[in-house]
Image (cartoon, helix red, strand yellow):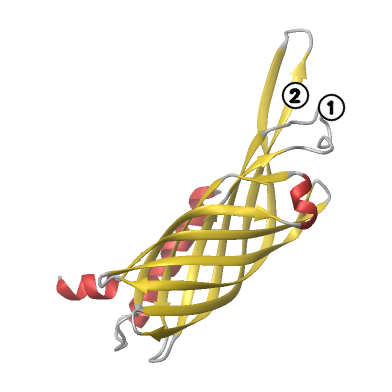
Amino acid sequence: MKLKLLSFFVLLSTTVSIKVWAQNRPDKLYSMSGIGFAFPIAKTSDYFKPKFSTSLGLNLGLGDGGLFLYPKVSLHAFTFNQITPDAGYTYTLQKGRSTTYLLNVALGYRKFVNKWAFYGFAGAGGGFILTPQVTVNSNTMQVTQDNKSNGLGITEVGAGIEYNLGGASLFVETSYMYGFGKIQDRTFNTVPVTIGIKPNLSKLLRKL
């Protein structure tokens, strides 16, 4: 499942980047990698606590203005404190680790002011969130842990700031992510905050 999600992301990025390569704009192709935290809000904070997260994506310029396509894979990590056991299980797991594999494809707009750039985006996608669960065998005194795959659709809106370093830009980005599905009978809501770097692949490939 993870391989299919990443393969789709690579295929989409490659197809669109070929189409935008002929455009005459300095920011037509950025890669993006960031680190940070995804902060659960509302009832999501009943069972998730933030841990270290990463995200990978591309900014693909559309036309000659500030529009860009923004496919992104979110690999958020959470501490999972189970409230009620899953069907067929007796025990709840505390201080476990949960990970997201979510692909969002957004449309954004970027505005340059000298070396600074400000942007906003909105989009939708989906994927799955792994939550651990445990089985206890009191006869053998063994505990077995496995993962439950929670599939769901998502929508995400956000904004960010970039600072141009020449061949790359530093950025800070925050967003609101809403899941069209429930975990522990509660809707998934989180606010990712990410810092990272966006190498300008347009300039790099132009030199090759």
Categorize mark 2 by other alpha carbons within 10 Å: few (<14), some (14-19), many (20+). Answer: some
- Res 27 → quadrant: bottom left
* Label 2 secondary element: strand
Q: Which mark is residue 90?
A: 1
- Three-letter code for the amino acid on which mark 1 is drawn: Thr
Where is residue 109? Give x, y as percent: 49, 83
Q: Quadrant of the C terminus?
A: bottom left
Secondary structure under badge 1?
loop
Mark 1, Cα crowd under 10 Å, few <14 / some 14-19 / many 20+, is few
Q: Label 2, label 1: how many angstroms apart (C-alpha)?
A: 7 Å
Where is residue 162 drawn, in percent x and y?
41, 72
> Is residue 162 shown above or below 47?
below
Residue shown at 25% from the left, 70% from the top: 167
Residue that mark 2 sits on:
135
Q: Name the residue: 75% across, 49% down.
A: 45
Task: Name the spot of residue 130 as percent of width and height, x first.
Answer: 64, 43
Circles 2 and 1, Cβ within 8 Å, touching? The answer is yes
Q: Where is residue 143 in the image (x, y as percent from the top left)?
A: 70, 19
